Every structure is written in structure tokens, then in C-alpha cells.
Amino acid sequence: MKSVVVTGVSSGIGWGTAKVLINKGVHVFGSIRKANDAERLSAEFGNAFTPLLFDVTDEGSVRKAANQVRECLNGQTLFGLVNNAGIAMSGLLMYQSVDEYRFQLEVNLVGPFIVTQAFLPWLGADRSLKGAPGRIINMSSVTGKIGLPFLGSYSASKHGLEGFSESLRRELMLYGIDVII
């Protein structure tokens, strides 16, 4: 059975992604930040879903979850990683605090970096695993191409994610791991 890690599955696009993948027979390891979301989603999705309790900005908890996934894979590769978790903070840049700006970048840009590094071995960077290399999907936005007023910090984070993804794609060609924006 194919397995995919999806971050931010408690609602929105992450929840929808998990639902579609599960309906197609894929096992989803879904990241959530709250234990009650783990219980709710486990009840909703059943055995085809394994909750992973972590915040994408917490390197220790992400690595712990990656090891949990490794145990479940039994020497197989992951089919994919969907870096979906993110936030959108609005407001005028001239009034946004440095802490708010930094938090936007931490969640939307540093988070995918942390998650990607943690799960890369299971996507095929560890060549001792059985199975085809996986793929990484980084959820960007139109604001990753066009900066919009009142979404400056969000736009900066998504522009950064686009650059990160393009560089990562070239670096991972060696392993056959595709990176899709």
C-alpha cells in the first residue's frame, strides 16, 4: 500500500487532501497539532489514517514523527510528502511586528524545510529502502508569484517556498525524488 505524509490535515486543503488520498487507497500519515484532532480524524478516516502529533516548527517533534513513520513503513519508501501546513497573516507591512513577520516565515518556510529534511530518507534518499522514490508537493499560492497588498509577509513566505522548491528539485534529481509546487 502506498503511504503519504500530509502536514496540516485538521482542516481545509490538508483535510481534503487526506480524504482524496484515502479514497484512492493510500495510507495517510497526517500531521496535527492537537490530540483531539487526532481522535476526530482517526474516527473519520479509520485505519487508512495515522495521526502524527507535531508542529512543523518543532524540529524535535517532527523528527520523532518521522521515526514513527519509518517504523510503519517496514523498509519501504514513502510515496509522497505534502507540505501543506501553513498560515496566512494579513496586515500592512509598515505596521506588522517583527515577531508576526518572523512567525509567518517560520511556519510557511522554515516548517517545510524541517519536515522535508526529516522525511527525505523515507522518500528514497536512503537507497537501502525498497520501492520507487517518492515525491514532495509543496503547497504554494498565487502570492508566491505576485506580491499583494496586505499579504506581504505571507507573500514573502510563499516566494521563499517557490525558491526553496526549485533548488530542492534540482538537488533531489540525483535520487529520483520529484519536487512539485
Image: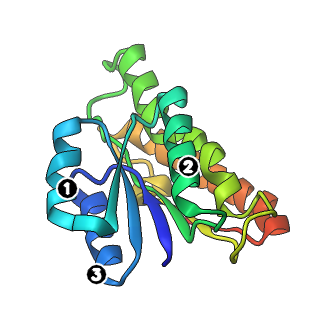
Provide the residue designation for mark 1. Answer: 41
Q: Residue at x 35, y 15 (%)?
A: 97
Q: Of the residues under marks 3 and 2, which one precedes in the sequence? A: 3
Provide the residue designation for mark 3. Answer: 23
| Numbered mark located on residue 161 in the image | 2
Identity of the amino acid at label 3?
Asn
Q: Residue at x 16, y 40 (%)?
A: 36
Q: Is residue 163 visible?
A: no
Does the residue at mark 2 contact the one at mark 1 (Cβ under 8 Å)? no
Q: Nearer the viewer, residue 98 or 74?
A: 74
Which part of the image, by quadrant, shows the C terminus? bottom right
Identity of the amino acid at label 1?
Leu
Identity of the amino acid at label 2?
Leu
Q: Residue at x 56, y 71 (%)?
A: 79
Q: Of the residues under marks 2 and 1, which one precedes in the sequence? A: 1
Q: Secondary structure at mark 2?
A: helix
Which residue ends up furthest to the bottom in the rendered image? 24
Q: Secondary structure at mark 3?
A: helix
Cα distance between the residues tagged 2 and 1: 28 Å
Q: Secondary structure at mark 1?
A: helix
> Is residue 28 shown left or right of residue 72?
left
| Residue 172 higher or lower than 115, as above or below | below
Q: Nearer the viewer, residue 170 or 24?
A: 24
